[in-house]
Image (cartoon, coloured by chain):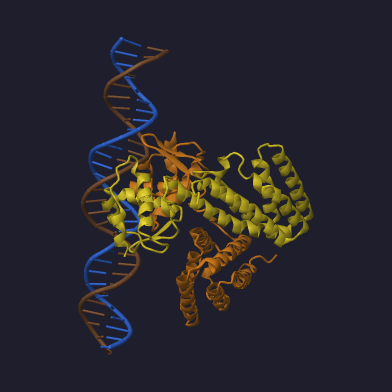
Chain colours: A yellow, B orange, C brown, D blue
Amino acid sequence: MSRAAIRYLEPIEAPSRGVAVLDALAEMIERAGLQVGDRLPPEVSIAAALGVGRSTIREALNRWEGLGIIRRRRGDGTYLTAKVQTSQGPLPTMIQLEGEAILRLLDMRRVIESGTVRRAAQNATLAQRQQISRLCDALLQIVDTGQPYRAADMAFHSAICDATGNPMFGQVLAKMDDALERSAESPFSVPGFGLASFPPHRDLANAIVAGDPDAAEAAINTILDSVESEIRQIIAPAQTR
Amino acid sequence: MSRAAIRYLEPIEAPSRGVAVLDALAEMIERAGLQVGDRLPPEVSIAAALGVGRSTIREALNRWEGLGIIRRRRGDGTYLTAKVQTSQGPLPTMIQLEGEAILRLLDMRRVIESGTVRRAAQNATLAQRQQISRLCDALLQIVDTGQPYRAADMAFHSAICDATGNPMFGQVLAKMDDALERSAESPFSVPGFGLASFPPHRDLANAIVAGDPDAAEAAINTILDSVESEIRQIIAPAQTR
DNA sequence: CTTCAGAATTTGTCAGACATTTGAAAATGA
DNA sequence: TCATTTTCAAATGTCTGACAAATTCTGAAG
């Protein structure tokens, strides 16, 4: 029964209830041991337990729904669709949740990027392969000299997307890039972010030029592995365990 | 003046106002030419122009705020902090698809679906595997008896998405489904569409239950192959190239 | 021209009400 | 007894109205 979970809620008094509500909810979910698929207490109960209006609860839950953390079904209830890890520390739970959303986005990106490089390795024209190799050289040189690499990186990956023959890959990856950059704790704002991921770029370019889809997929996975580990370090610095 | 922008809003009547409001807002922002940093019209004006309550507007804006698209300042207004990607997901709303665009979307879908079933085969819990197997049985029986299979098919794939542990896969695939259905030449409006793709569904369910990612990917590719060939037959006559 | 008080505007929150949908218990029928 | 239909309680979706709080604009006083 989801009813039992509401006893883990205490009235809140902090200013800016919006974020406070999310913190209280995250704590409740953890302490009540709610799992993915479980139903949350109804909005009216949550509102009553926290001593706030239902509108406030709904506004908070809307944000979570946008992030894919919960799913609501009219006439039924609200269900948990993703794991909520508060990490039990002094870290603001809200930040933590956004971090999990970033990791999910990156996982999504890994899938699309795998398909992209495979198709690029198979479908690229000779001119496109030369262009990719050239842009990779330019990118690595810029990184070596310590200059801002963002533009060159995007040009490199953009060329790969063009080589797939399906412009949708480029559009979708650009959207996901935007979403990452605009995130609350954008990894791109961290100085030196992503440097470890550049050496494998040479492997990726070589694999595409050689027309080897498996090697290209392996290379992009290596790149994304290092990016993911860097992001994990950013969003979970207190996980000393 | 942000006031001028509200004339691009027209009353909406679709069911489920929440998403309709976001679409209307995105269209307004585009048509009014609002840039990053510009102020949106006040909530009351938007609500009045759309003919909905302010609560509905606020719920929609809250999702955007959670995604970092807008920033709100109490007593001041709401400002655009990022280029609007219509609707909330990482995928753009591909409003009108026709001809080759459908095939490109299907190729995109093949990539995402491959990643989805692989993750489902690896991460699904025992209960989720049983649920998937059960839903597959129900789906095949419905198809055999000639009943409308759309709902059962969506339930089956939805269960697979849930099993990935990453709700974004479900969101993205649902959005692609919507795009296909809304398409000018929607394959779903063709009677008997997709029937050939159902026998391999059993293989897909078995592979996920057995936890075999490679077999699951092979099965989903077989399914999508038959769907693609059917779509080609539908759209090919119109393109007597 | 500068400064400051107050009005106007805008978002944040609350309360109550009704609509719509869902799920399950209860009633009905064979 | 079992299957089907009806009814009803519960939950989310939406609207209205109101007030609080913060910001910006306005205008008068110095």
Q: Which residue is drawn at the image coordinates 58% and 72% (left, top)?
A: B212
**Quarter of the rendering containing residue D27:** top left
**Quarter of the rendering containing residue B103:** bottom right
Residue A197 in view, yes or no: yes
Between B110 and A212, which is closer to the camera in this rendering? A212
Q: Which residue is drawn at the image coordinates 42% and 54% (left, top)?
A: A65
Q: Position of residue A143 (x, y in %)?
A: 69, 41
Between D10 and B105, which is closer to the camera in this rendering? D10
Q: Position of residue A237 (x, y in %)?
A: 51, 46
A74, above or below B85, in the image:
below
**Quarter of the rendering containing residue B76:** top left
Q: Residue furthest front?
A: A241
Name the image quarter holding the N terminus of chain B. Answer: top left
A41, above or below B235, in the image:
above
B14, above or below B124, in the image:
above
Q: Position of residue A136 (x, y in %)?
A: 73, 47
Residue A175 in view, yes or no: no
In the displayed structure, does residue B211 sit left or right of residue C5?
right
Q: Which residue is drawn at the image coordinates 74% and 56% (left, top)?
A: A208
Q: Position of residue D19 (x, y in %)?
A: 23, 38
Between A199 and B166, which is closer to the camera in this rendering? A199
Name the image quarter holding the C terminus of chain B. Answer: bottom right
Q: How many marks?
A: 0
